[in-house]
Image: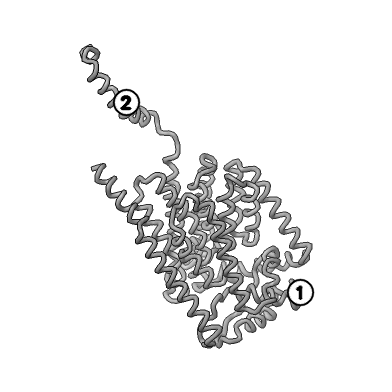
């Protein structure tokens, strides 16, 4: 029976790493590129006025840059000026889009400040290309063991959902990959990557906590100093009132959009908070349920980092918990799932025991950004990634249990199984000893 199960495991593992995987990923990548090219052509060359503009969220970045350049950085929080700039960006569209508010901290405003020096299509193309390049470069340390073919990484739908949306998820993905992928070889650079996540602060707090649990004190110090330097530089360049206005608009955004956003907002959020709010729970209950599950996941991740501070399963747990911890998470942030996919596949290759359920879960994780996107614009269904994240964390924790030392009884049985053939051989060659 064990032999049959082992053969079944090997057949399934070979299936998931065969040429079929490369062909499927290549076909998926080709389809996504065709959609991107046709979408861009419809918007900017054919000027079809009722097509949703490509990079719809990028209009907030470009609009904030335009307002900052012409009216000062503080004016980027003015909805009237921002709406005028965004309509200029989408002047070829007849769709009446609401204003995309600017709710980002000053360090990220400093990053996007020069975007409007180029036209919207050029700025969007440059931003997307640089984001994709930084993402792929940051994944190189994780890809050294070749857990998946590069085509599977490039074709990952989460990458292209972020590009279609015009979001900064690939930049934050690159920083998260640097924070966990460079920790063993360049801890200071890893800490700097974690500190730069201040541009999206709701995803940042997990990494310094994990650095402390894993006793990576150089990385923790680098992360803290990076946050101080980046925030200080943005304050000196853009002014202290920008921080005051940022926190004011952030509180207003949380009250109107997150807490009372309705199905339109909650339907785009793969979080426990959004699911419980859509189910009819009040705000306090939704926060309680969300943080109870998220803090349990945080404790599991901390335990992994305390016991195995240099293992891929610990890094995978940190990424998953970073996505679970914040009640505000949108479907395009699922691009981060690329990292747990790579870490889990690497572990499957190193320890190919009981990998069939794991490979099925990885396949679902790889494809989940597509139904997450479709559920927002077409199907208006639940964000199933909400339930996938805790499942991924449980599988990661289960795989990590094999790292520790075996119990005494298991060690004795393994030693007995190893020594039995030798003892039998020695007895066979020494009849007198066997008789004795």
Residue at (58% x, 53% y) in the render: 178
- Residue 162 in picture, x, y percent from top left: 53, 68
> Considering the image in quadrants, where does the C terminus appear?
top left
Q: Quadrant of residue 387?
A: bottom left
Residue 231 visible in the current orientation: yes
- Residue 139 in picture, x, y percent from top left: 53, 56
Q: Is residue 347 left or right of residue 72?
A: left
Residue at (55% x, 71% y) in the render: 261
Q: Which mark is residue 72?
A: 1
The residue that mark 2 highlights is 419
- Label 1, residues with CA under 10 Å away: few <14, some 14-19, many ≥20: few
- Label 2, residues with CA under 10 Å away: few <14, some 14-19, many ≥20: few
* Number of disc labels: 2
Residue at (33% x, 56% y) in the render: 15
Q: Is residue 244 left or right of residue 350?
A: right
Say which element carries label 1: loop
Say which element carries label 2: helix
């Amino acid at each position: 029976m064990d032999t049959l199960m082992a053969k079944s495991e090997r057949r399934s593992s070979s299936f998931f790493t065969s040429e079929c995987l490369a062909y499927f990923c290549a076909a998926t990548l080709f389809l996504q590129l065709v959609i991107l090219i046709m979408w861009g052509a419809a918007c900017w060359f054919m000027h079809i006025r009722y097509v949703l503009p490509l990079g719809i969220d990028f209009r907030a970045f470009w609009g904030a840059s335009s307002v900052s350049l012409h009216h000062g950085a503080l004016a980027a929080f003015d909805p009237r000026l921002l709406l005028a700039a965004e309509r200029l960006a989408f002047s070829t569209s007849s769709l009446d889009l609401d204003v995309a508010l600017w709710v980002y901290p000053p360090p990220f405003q400093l990053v996007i400040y020069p975007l409007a020096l180029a036209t919207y299509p050029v700025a969007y193309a440059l931003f997307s290309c640089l984001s994709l390049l930084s993402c792929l470069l940051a994944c190189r340390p994780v890809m050294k063991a070749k857990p998946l073919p590069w085509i599977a990484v490039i074709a990952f739908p989460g990458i292209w959902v972020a590009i279609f949306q015009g979001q900064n998820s690939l930049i934050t993905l690159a920083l998260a990959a640097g924070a966990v992928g460079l920790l063993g070889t360049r801890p200071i650079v890893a800490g700097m990557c974690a500190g730069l996540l201040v541009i999206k602060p709701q995803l940042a707090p997990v990494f310094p906590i994990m650095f402390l649990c894993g006793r990576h004190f150089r990385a923790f110090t680098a992360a803290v100093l990076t946050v101080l330097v980046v925030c200080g530089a943005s304050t000196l360049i853009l002014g202290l009132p920008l921080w005051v206005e940022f926190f004011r608009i952030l509180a207003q955004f949380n009250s109107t959009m997150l807490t009372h956003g309705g199905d339109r907002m909650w339907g785009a959020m793969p979080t426990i908070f959004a699911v419980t709010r859509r189910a009819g729970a009040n705000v306090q209950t939704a926060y309680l349920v969300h943080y109870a599950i998220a803090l349990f996941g945080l404790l599991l991740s901390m335990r992994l980092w305390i016991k195995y501070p240099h293992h891929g399963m610990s890094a995978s747990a940190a990424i998953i918990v970073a996505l679970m911890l914040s009640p505000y998470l949108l479907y395009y942030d699922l691009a981060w799932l690329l990292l747990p996919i790579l870490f889990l596949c690497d572990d499957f290759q190193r320890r190919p025991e009981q990998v069939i359920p794991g490979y099925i879960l990885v396949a679902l994780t790889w494809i989940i950004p597509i139904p997450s996107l479709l559920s927002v614009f077409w199907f208006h269904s639940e964000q199933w990634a909400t339930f996938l994240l805790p499942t991924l964390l449980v599988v990661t924790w289960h795989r990590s249990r094999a790292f520790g030392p075996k119990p005494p009884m298991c060690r004795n049985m393994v030693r007995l199984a190893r020594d039995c053939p030798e003892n039998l051989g020695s007895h066979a060659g020494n009849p007198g000893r066997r008789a004795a």
